[in-house]
Image: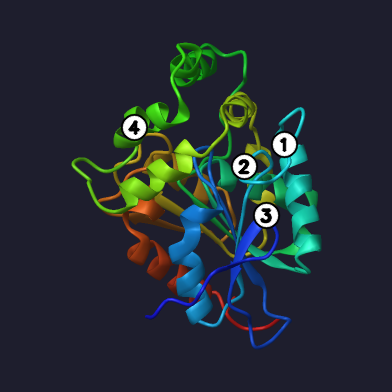
Amino acid sequence: MSALPVTLTVPLWAEAGRSADPAQPVLVFLHGIGGGKQGFASQLAYFAQAGWRALAWDMPGYGQSAALNPVDFPALADALLRMLDAAGIRRAVLIGHSMGGMVAQQAWTLCPERIAGLVIAASSPAFGHSTGEFQKQFVAQRLAPLDAGKTMAEVAQALIPTMVAPAYQGPGFALAWDCMSAVPCATYRASIQALVTFEQRAALPTITVPTLCLAAEYDTTAPPEVMRRMAEKIPGAVFEVLADAGHLLYFEQPDRFNAVIDHFLKKQGLDRAE
């Protein structure tokens, strides 16, 4: 499938394609803590070629998007909705990776009428309490390199190999490094602190739109078993595991990631207008 050009609209997002029917939902890709809209170039090109309007957002504090103060999930979900308004999107299929999957869940609690479907990839419905020992250790571990004076490029160089499948050395490694290296230190710190406050387990049974919970075989951040239990709590949710991939599954296996989502969208009838 040949790639279509991806054009920048405003600094908040990158976009490709246009649906033949304006009533068809728009695909909106939401990145994780170490990501950015540029990481979804393969997805935008693929789904634009398939007839979708597809958009990848830079969360607040990423790219040229203005930062939030403070950073929390209600504010992130509100910023997402304001972006949908600015982009003229009435209803979206939210495709969220890691923290982006959490933002998608939070958005469901805020305005379910704007959401036509969910793809939650390598994510979870909760991280626990920010004052818990595990959470405090997680924050300390992730922020220790910055506290020691390391740059985000150095953080990426050390962290990314732990987040991919064993022995992975494909081209997605360089793209993931580019994305994480470009994240401002202040944004990374604020996102890590926000991550450990996320809690939406009670919302899972309320999700009434088609939902795909997509795990990765070698993901130790959002293990397949965690995502399987999550899917069981969402009425009618589909659960799949992408083999030979780690937490950065769409960087590692972009073609298979795209194909799984494409199949889900078609099977659920989301490729057709409302």
**Image disc number at residue 157:** 4
The mark found on residue 11 in the picture is: 3
Find the distance from the CA under tag 1 to the CA under tag 3. 13 Å
Residue 47 at x, y percent in the picture: 50, 74
Disc 1 to disc 4, how far (Cα)? 25 Å
Q: Position of residue 110 (x, y in %)?
A: 79, 49
Lower sequence index among marks 1 and 4: 1
* Label 3: which secondary element: loop
Which residue is identified by label 1? 67
Which amino acid, mark 1?
Ala
Q: Position of residue 141 (x, y in %)?
A: 44, 16
Q: CA distance from mark 2 to mark 3?
A: 10 Å
Q: Secondary structure at mark 1?
A: loop
> Which image quadrant is residue 161 in?
top left
In the image, 222 versus 177, the foreground residue is 177
First in sequence, mark 1 or 3: give its number.
3
Q: Which class describes the residues within 10 Å of circle 2: few (<14), some (14-19), or many (20+)?
A: many
The residue located at (62%, 42%) in the rendering is 62
